[in-house]
């Protein structure tokens, strides 16, 4: 599967290596092309997954702020609920397309 924005592949991994949570595909951290990601100051909190951190995505001098998120320290019990450890796995929105 691939995460694509601005005609650039941001992340790519076999579907078996991704984790599906609440309709979103989460990519393993080592599947990201780190050249396109910069840490963001944005944080949100999910009542059961914990605090999410965000990345800004930049491709060809265009920025897509806060378009990728991950959980650096999932809330107690959330990994068991998902069935897999999703620590630092990255999901996308704000126009980033995830395709097979």
Image (cartoon, helix red, strand yellow):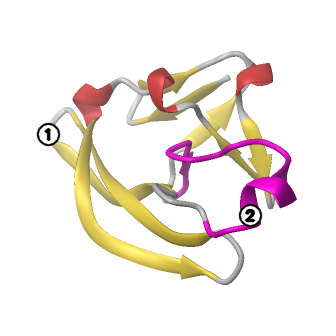
Q: Earlier in the sequence, mark 2 or mark 1?
A: 1
Q: Residue furthest top?
A: 14
Where residue 33 sits: x, y (%)?
36, 23
Q: Secondary structure at mark 2?
A: helix
Q: Residue at x 85, y 47 (%)?
A: 83
| Side (left or right) of 57 relative to 71 | left
Q: Is residue 89 magenta?
A: yes
Q: Secondary structure at mark 1?
A: loop
Q: Which corner quadrant of the image does residue 17 belong to?
A: top right
The range drawn in magenta is 75-93
| Side (left or right) of 81 relative to 2 | right
Where residue 39 sits: x, y (%)?
24, 53
Label 2 and label 1: CA atoms lie apart by 37 Å
Q: Residue at x 29, y 29 (%)?
A: 34
Q: Which mark is residue 39?
A: none
CB atoms of marks 2 and 1 within 8 Å: no
| Side (left or right) of 1 relative to 53 | right
How many marks on residues?
2
Residue 89 vs 67, above or below: the answer is above
Please name the residue that numbered disc 2 is placed on: 78
Q: Quadrant of the C terminus?
A: top right
Q: Residue at x 14, y 39 (%)?
A: 61
Where residue 19 sits: x, y (%)?
74, 39
33 or 80: nearer the viewer: 80
Residue 51 vs 69, above or below: the answer is below
Q: Circle 2: is it few (<14), some (14-19), or many (20+) Cα within 10 Å?
A: some
Please name the residue that numbered disc 1 is placed on: 61
62 or 92: nearer the viewer: 92
Q: Residue at x 48, y 67 (%)?
A: 52
Where residue 65 sits: x, y (%)?
30, 61
Q: Residue furthest front?
A: 76
């Amino acid at each position: 599967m691939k995460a694509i924005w601005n005609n650039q592949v941001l992340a790519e991994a076999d579907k078996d290596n991704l984790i599906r949570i609440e309709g979103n595909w989460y990519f393993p951290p080592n599947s990201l092309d780190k050249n396109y990601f910069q840490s963001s100051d944005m944080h949100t909190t999910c009542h059961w997954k914990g605090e999410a951190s965000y990345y800004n995505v930049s491709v060809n001098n265009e920025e897509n702020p806060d378009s990728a998120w991950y959980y650096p320290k999932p809330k107690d019990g959330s990994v068991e609920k998902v069935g897999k450890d999703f620590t630092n796995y990255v999901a996308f929105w704000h126009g980033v397309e995830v395709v097979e």
